[in-house]
Image (cartoon, rainbow, N blue to C red):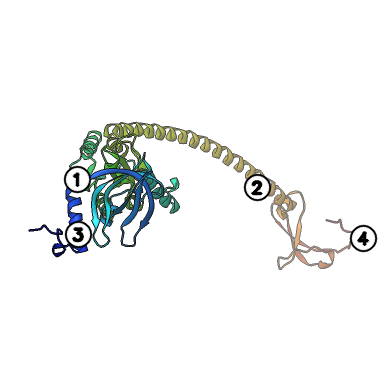
């Protein structure tokens, strides 16, 4: 009995043969790494990537399925030297061997650096990296929200530092995945939840140290935009001091570590109490000085007012005396006191002309100290002109 394909009667169809080869290849090789130069790169509309890896003497068709594209930092550039990890397979419809890639790394930091710079450029274009948009961290927060893994060491460090510095501050944990494929979406959801809640005074977003791949979620553009849009002042605390992420660029404050973020967010209670006591002493001293200075100024103003009042009174007295003298000089009584007399008719009117008198006419002579009854005996008009006034 012949084996399949051993005789014309047992011949494979093309599709059967290609499927057989596919099964043999996929079953014969574990996932492996292959080094080569990227050529003929094409990003298909369905999300798949197609390109060729080549060296000086050979080439290999490669594909990255859309589900795996999401895990890669960026698309490779034409001519870039890369290391690709994947499995051999056959595309049955064409009988074409291809390398199905699940991981891709460029020499050095090529792909990672490329994605970092692309994200940075997009955020900078929208003004999200402008230092002027950064907000001050509240000096006296009552509630600190922490977006991180609920099981990570970072959370323990943050809580320990805050409790040590000021146990009166509330710490609210908003758990999120901080690495892996689900991390960006999880971080975005947690940050948006803090914003909707509105009960936090400051939010710390971050995690402890790890590899570049572990920290990469904090370089995701979606996470960066969520941090920038958060209505609560933000502190980014990703990895260790040497690690730097896109999240650090958009946050209001970058802390080297989660512990440093907690220190930046919460002042020491004992120092606050001492500062308040010192401020109270300063205020009391300043108040006493102001009261003393005001009292001195008030006494000085009182003396000045008294002097001015006395001078004003003396000036008014002098003016009154001057006016009184002038009135006295113009008063008829004053004239009478100087030896003059006024003749008045029976009707009490002053008789100021000789023609007003007739012989035998009675009249009164008003003197300074009394009234004299008189009668006209003779009238002699004066030939001398009256004295001008």
Q: Nearer the viewer, mark 4 or mark 3?
A: 3
Q: Position of residue 13 (x, y in %)?
A: 19, 64
> Circle 4 sits on which residue?
383
> Circle 1 sits on which residue?
30
Sequence-wise, which precedes: disc 3 or disc 2?
Answer: 3
Residue plotted at (19% across, 44% down):
150
Query: Mark 2 falls on what kind of element?
Result: helix
> Circle 3 sits on which residue?
17
Rendering quarter of residue 243: top left
Residue plotted at (61% across, 43% down):
312
Sequence-wise, which precedes: disc 4 or disc 1?
Answer: 1
Q: CA distance from mark 4 to mark 1?
A: 160 Å
Q: Position of residue 275 (x, y in %)?
A: 33, 33
65 displayed left or right of 279: left
Q: CA distance from mark 3 to mark 2?
A: 136 Å
Sequence-wise, which precedes: disc 1 or disc 3?
Answer: 3
**136 w.r.t. 345: above or below:** above
Sequence-wise, which precedes: disc 2 or disc 1?
Answer: 1
**105 w.r.t. 386: above or below:** above
Q: Residues within 10 Å of mark 1 (few under 14, many from 20)?
A: few
Q: Position of residue 81 (x, y in %)?
A: 37, 43
């Amino acid at each position: 009995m012949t084996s399949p394909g051993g005789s014309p009667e047992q011949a494979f169809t093309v599709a059967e043969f290609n499927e057989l080869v596919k099964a043999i290849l996929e079953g014969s090789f574990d996932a492996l790494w292959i080094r080569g130069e990227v050529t003929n790169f094409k990003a298909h509309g369905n999300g798949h990537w197609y390109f060729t890896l080549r060296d000086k003497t050979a080439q290999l068709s490669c594909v990255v399925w859309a589900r795996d594209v999401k895990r890669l930092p960026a698309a490779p550039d034409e001519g870039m030297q890369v290391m690709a990890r994947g499995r051999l397979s056959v595309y049955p419809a064409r009988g074409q061997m291809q390398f199905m890639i699940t991981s891709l790394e460029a020499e050095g930091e090529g792909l990672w650096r490329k994605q970092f710079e692309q994200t940075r450029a997009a955020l900078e274009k929208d003004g999200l990296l402008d230092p002027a948009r950064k907000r001050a961290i509240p000096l006296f927060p009552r509630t600190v929200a922490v977006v991180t893994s609920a099981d990570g060491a970072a959370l323990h460090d943050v809580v320990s530092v805050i409790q040590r510095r000021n146990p009166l501050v509330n710490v609210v944990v908003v758990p999120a995945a901080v690495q892996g494929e689900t991390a960006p979406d999880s971080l975005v959801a947690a940050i948006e939840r803090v914003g909707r809640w509105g009960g936090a005074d400051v939010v710390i977003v971050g995690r402890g140290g790890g590899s570049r791949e572990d920290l990469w979620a904090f370089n995701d553009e979606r996470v960066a935009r969520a941090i920038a849009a958060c209505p609560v002042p933000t502190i980014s605390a990703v990895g260790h001091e040497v690690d730097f992420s896109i999240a650090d660029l958009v946050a209001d404050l970058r802390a080297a570590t989660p512990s440093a973020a907690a220190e930046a967010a919460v002042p020491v209670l004992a120092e606050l109490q001492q500062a308040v006591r010192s401020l109270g002493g300063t205020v009391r001293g300043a108040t006493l000085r102001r009261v003393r200075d005001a009292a001195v100024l008030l006494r000085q103003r009182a003396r000045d007012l008294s002097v001015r009042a006395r001078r004003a009174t003396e000036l008014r007295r002098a003016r009154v005396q001057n006016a009184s003298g002038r009135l006295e000089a113009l008063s008829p009584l004053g004239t009478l006191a100087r030896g003059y007399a006024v003749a008045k008719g029976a009707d009490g009117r002053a008789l100021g002309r000789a023609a007003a008198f007739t012989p035998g006419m009675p009249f009164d002579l008003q003197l300074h100290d009394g009234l004299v009854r008189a009668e006209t005996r003779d009238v002699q008009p004066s030939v001398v002109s009256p004295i001008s006034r």
